[in-house]
């Protein structure tokens, strides 16, 4: 994963959480659509994929700037396991989606707080006050 | 990219309000009787469909594919005193099931609220990001 010296992994984390929230928003929007199957990001797959380019870069291959690209996001998008089957084939459980959405939003804001702290300490260093 | 959550939640809001509209229309016409079983009002139901986007499968909203009419039988009532009754004295009431419509209304309203919450959260997050470092 590309490590920005200032923000570390948080810049990537923000993007990922944002993508996850888009998926969850789509699930909630389609809670009443017959045949719709809920989707989510598999972070374990993403982590494994993000660790891949570091290995190829060591061999002199073109190093990608960001550890996560579209293809990897697509590969890590998985269908959610169904908890309560419904007659119309819809696999969205609104309560689950809402709690996951809240979780993703909290993690997003946690990353934001870390970035904010970094910026503040940088500002303190610059102004010396 | 960042505006996609708003698009998705917005599509859900408009789909759910179409659903609320059909419920309102069905409830309003629940007592619109007719002298002919074919011309009587029929309950209307929206059909939802996920917006297929091959370019970007992770973000898909919802759309109303169409509004179909219920195929259930009209209710036959014997009202010989009614001026629009047919020659046997029957009038036909719409196949609207009030209980079903109320349940539909609550479900649509809850789904609408869920999408509004999604929008609010996304808005808060975007604003916080914009205020980063201030």
Image: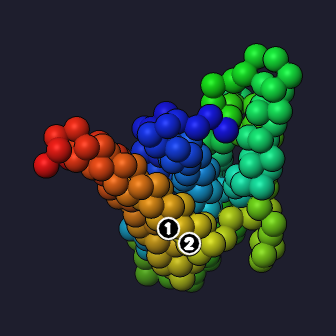
Mark 1 secondary-structure assignment: helix
Is residue A110 shown to the viewer in this render?
yes
For marks 1 and 2, give the CA distance: 5 Å
The residue labelled by disc 1 is A102
Give the x, y percent position of residue B76: 62, 76
State which chain disc 2 sits on. A
Q: Name the side, left or right, on which B105 lies relative to A27.
A: left
- Number of numbered discs visible in the structure rendering: 2
Quarter of the figure that contains the N terminus of chain A: top right
Q: Name the side, left or right, on which A18 lies relative to A59.
A: left
The residue labelled by disc 2 is A99
Mark sitting on residue B70: none
Q: Name the side, left or right, on which A15 lies relative to B120.
A: right
Q: Please, is residue B134 above or below residue B19 in the view?
A: above
Give the x, y percent position of residue B44: 56, 58
Is residue B64 shown to the viewer in this render?
no
In terms of depth relative to the viewer, which is nearer, A114 or B112? A114
**Extreme residue in the front direction:** A128
Give the x, y percent position of residue B133: 26, 45
Q: Are marks 1 and 2 in contact (CB under 8 Å)?
A: yes
The residue shown at (51%, 61%) is A107
Mark 1 neighbour density, 10 Å: few (under 14) some (14–19) many (20 or more): some
The residue shown at (40%, 63%) is B117
In terms of depth relative to the viewer, which is nearer, B116 or B49? B116
């Amino acid at each position: 994963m590309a490590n920005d010296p200032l923000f570390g992994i948080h810049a990537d984390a923000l993007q990922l959480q944002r993508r996850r929230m888009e998926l969850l928003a789509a699930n909630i929007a389609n809670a009443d659509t017959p045949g719709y199957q809920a989707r989510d990001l598999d972070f374990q797959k993403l982590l494994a994929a993000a660790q891949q380019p570091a290995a190829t870069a060591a061999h002199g291959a073109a190093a990608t700037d960001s550890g996560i690209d579209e293809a990897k996001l697509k590969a890590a998008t998985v269908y959610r396991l169904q908890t309560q089957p419904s007659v119309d084939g819809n696999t969205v459980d609104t309560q689950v989606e809402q709690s996951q959405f809240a979780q993703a939003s909290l993690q997003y804001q946690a990353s934001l707080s870390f970035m904010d702290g970094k910026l503040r300490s940088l500002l303190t260093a610059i102004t010396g006050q | 990219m960042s505006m996609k959550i708003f698009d998705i939640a917005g599509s859900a809001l408009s789909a759910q309000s179409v659903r609320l509209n059909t419920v309102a229309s069905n409830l309003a016409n629940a007592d619109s009787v007719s002298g002919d079983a074919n011309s009587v009002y029929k309950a209307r139901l929206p059909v939802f469909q996920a917006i297929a986007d091959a370019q970007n499968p992770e973000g898909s909203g919802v759309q109303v594919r169409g509004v179909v009419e219920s195929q259930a039988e009209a209710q036959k009532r014997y009202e010989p005193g009614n001026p629009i009754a047919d020659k046997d004295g029957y009038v036909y009431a719409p196949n609207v099931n009030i209980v079903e419509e109320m349940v539909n209304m609550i479900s649509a309203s809850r789904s609408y609220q869920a999408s509004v919450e999604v929008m609010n959260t996304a808005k808060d997050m975007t604003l916080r990001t914009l205020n980063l470092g201030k």
